Image (cartoon, rainbow, N blue to C red):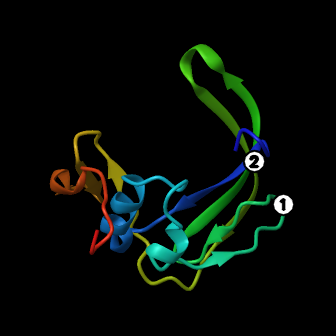
């Protein structure tokens, strides 16, 4: 993102919650997350980064500002892709302590919040 000044924000649904947490606990510099987690990269129209086919929606974004003292990246959505045929449409939101809210229901994934390690390692 800092090199290209662009990125994709992917919007997963609740059926992907455990996978999303595992993805977030490992580094893309050491793991091919698309391969390791069985994700489908789709070509974006206006940015280099791929869309994620399993997600409900993806936003193609350009970086328009960076507030260095706070590490805040300001994005502008350029295009939005949505899978209108996707049956699961409920998104989930982090509470910040390992629990998540889905349509008002809290899901506790605190036990998954450690660093992800591939099987067999």
Q: Residue at x 67, y 57 (%)?
A: 59
65 or 23: nearer the viewer? 23
- Please determine whether, in this image, residue 37 is positioned above or below residue 117: below
Q: Residue at x 47, y 80 (%)?
A: 38
Q: Does 27 sit left or right of 81 as displayed?
A: left
Q: Residue at x 78, y 42 (%)?
A: 5
- Please determine whether, in this image, residue 112 is positioned above or below residue 72: below
- Please determine whether, in this image, residue 104 is positioned above or below residue 119: above
Q: Which residue is mark 1?
A: 46
Specify the quadrant that holds the C terminus. Answer: bottom left
| Mark number, residue 112 | none
| SS at badge 2 | strand
Q: Residue at x 45, y 74 (%)?
A: 36
Please identify the residue farthest to the top as the structure is shown: 69
**Residue 69 in which image quadrant:** top right
107 or 104: nearer the viewer? 107
22 or 65: nearer the viewer? 22
Q: Does 97 sit left or right of 67 as displayed?
A: left
Please identify the residue farthest to the right as the structure is shown: 46
Q: Say if mark 1 contacts mark 2, CB within 8 Å.
A: yes
| SS at badge 1 | loop
Q: Does 61 sit left or right of 37 as displayed?
A: right
Where residue 2 appears, as percent x and y from the top left, is 72, 38
Where residue 89 appears, as percent x and y from the top left, is 44, 72
Q: Residues within 10 Å of mark 2 (few under 14, many from 20)?
A: many
- Please determine whether, in this image, residue 13 is positioned above or below residue 60: below
**Earlier sequence position, callout 1 versus callout 2:** 2
| Mark number, residue 6 | 2
Q: Does 33 sit left or right of 79 as displayed?
A: left
Where residue 85 appears, as percent x and y from the top left, is 56, 86
Where residue 109 appears, as percent x and y from the top left, is 20, 56
Specify the quadrant that holds the N terminus. Answer: top right
């Amino acid at each position: 993102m800092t090199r290209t000044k662009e990125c994709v924000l992917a919007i997963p649904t609740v059926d992907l919650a455990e996978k999303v947490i595992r993805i977030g606990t490992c580094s893309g510099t050491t793991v091919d997350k698309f391969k390791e987690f069985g994700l489908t990269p789709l070509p974006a129209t206006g940015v280099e980064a791929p869309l994620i086919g399993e997600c409900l929606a993806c936003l193609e974004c350009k970086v328009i500002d960076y507030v260095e003292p706070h590490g805040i990246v300001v994005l502008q959505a350029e295009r939005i892709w949505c899978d209108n045929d996707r049956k699961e449409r409920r998104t989930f939101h982090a509470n910040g302590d390992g629990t998540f809210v889905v349509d008002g229901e809290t899901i506790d994934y605190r036990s998954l919040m450690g660093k992800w390690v591939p099987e067999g390692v």
